[in-house]
Image: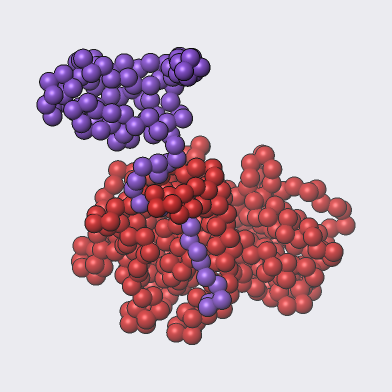
Amino acid sequence: MDDVKCIIRTSNSKPGPGDAGRTGSWRVERPVIDHQKCTPAKRQKSSCYLCWLYCPDGVISKELEPKIDLEYCKGCGICAQECPTGAIEMVEESSLIEEEKRSHAKN
Amino acid sequence: MQRIESGNVAAALGVMLAKTQVVAAYPITPQTPLTEKLSELIENGDLAAEYITVESEHSALAVCIGAASAGARAFTATSANGLLYMSEQVHWAAGARLPLVMCVVNRGVGAPWTVWNDHQDSISQRDAGWIQIYVNDHQEIIDTVIKAFRLAEAVSIPVMVCYDGYYLSHTYMPFDVPDEDKVDAFLPAFSYKHTLDPEHPENLNTVTMPFARADRDGVIQPGYMDIRHNLHQELRQALPIFEQIDSDYQAIFGRGGSPILSRYQCDGADYIVVAMGSLSNRIKDIVDELNGEGLKIGVLSVHLYRPFPQEQIIAALRDVKGAIVIEKALSYGNQGALFGDIKAVLYPCAQRPFIHSYIIGLGGREIKKADLYDAIKASCTASETFEDTSRWIGLNR
């Protein structure tokens, strides 16, 4: 049996950003946070963070102004659904991309 | 030690001797007495294992997948619709490369509902990536369950040990129960290379890209297709490894020598009947009778069905005049499953036998000796050319 050796390939990996690839490209709608409404941003206190807690991909930071890592956010919309102050709006990705293109051309 | 017990008890004793650590199974006829015996052995302290009760076969295999991922030697068993209910996890266990062992106590698949024997249940799972072994009697059941753990752990691929419902599961036969010390020497404690460890968290089989890509540390990891190709390659390697394991077993226990195919009266035979499971033993009687009448016929029993033993099948059948495949399962809308596999294997041979196919005994339909005799004799003596599809034996039209 010495001459046969199995390699045993599996898809096991260590946890880290991008384990499933750049899933941000899957997004149809992008979550946009209004810091005028967002509880920790408005009060400048570490509080609420329900978006951080509920995000299934762990891409929202726990800062006074929470940030969303758009490289990996799939745009599921759970954060917008859970936000108690309605501070997160799901905006169509294509319209944002168009907007970004226009502002890029201007500059 | 010799004992007279049912085939289900033979399987349970094999699981006990293999020092299985986790058993999760959901009772279904005709597998039920196997799970009952295992729960009894665990309750009595004869087997130091966790028996995890579950609400379905899907959960039974899911529990075994979890247990094996955590480094435990795990076992489950089922039949028919239970196997199909766990089918999603059956494929998962192979892709995850978990060395589980499962007994499939063969039973026909509903609808219409049936509890009686045929091979459609496990044959329908032949493409899941498991190793499938079909055994013919009680001694082979207990020996093969023990060997199956070593095979599964050697290649990190799960193994199904398939045996006929009622014909083997519920009949009583004498068999030798191997000594515990010798089994311990043959089958050392299991250690799996990927063990769940809360201190070092890992992602197991999360979504895998079609392409190879760098992991967190920048190391290029295989994509889905690479992982599946590796499973296929290593399934093929299971053939020589199983032969080696069987020969190690034979050296210790004195039984074995034909783990892949077993041959009865095949030397110098003009015709060979091919079958799987206990049916192979019944056909031996017919063959004896026909050999007494001057024909030269042997029986080839296929034990290892996946990976399919191409070279061994070619060597066994290439030089005969005719091969007659009799089986209890088919690919609906096509033909007998084993028949199709055997024809495909022989196609590249310059010289090959005629091959006839018969379907028999579905849903426990009585397999009459006279029907077998007539079919085999007709195949060996007919002047007509047979159609290239399966004839059904014993239909009541």
Model colouring: by chain
Q: Quadrant of the N terminus of chain B?
A: bottom left
Direction front: furthest residue:
A107
What's the residue at 35%, 69% (across, down)?
B190
Q: Is residue A30 left or right of residue B380?
A: left
Residue closer to the observer: B108 or A99: A99
Decide: is A15 above or below A32: below
Residue B352 occupies quadrant: bottom right
Q: Which chain is red?
A: B
Direction right: furthest residue:
B383
Q: Is residue B104 visible?
A: no
Residue closer to the observer: A73 or B361: A73
Image coords of residue B391 (percent x, y): 72, 48
The color chain A is rendered in = purple
| Tally of marks | 0
Residue closer to the observer: B73 or B83: B73
What's the residue at 43%, 52% (across, down)?
B218
Image coords of residue A24 (percent x, y): 42, 31
Residue closer to the observer: B233 or B275: B233
What's the residue at 34%, 32% (across, down)?
A69
Image coords of residue A66 (percent x, y): 24, 27
Q: Quadrant of the C terminus of chain B?
A: top right
Image coords of residue B127 (percent x, y): 56, 50
Q: Is residue B63 left or right of residue B91?
A: left
What's the residue at 52%, 70% (across, down)?
A5
Q: Is residue B387 left or right of residue B61?
A: right
Q: Is residue B196 visible?
A: yes
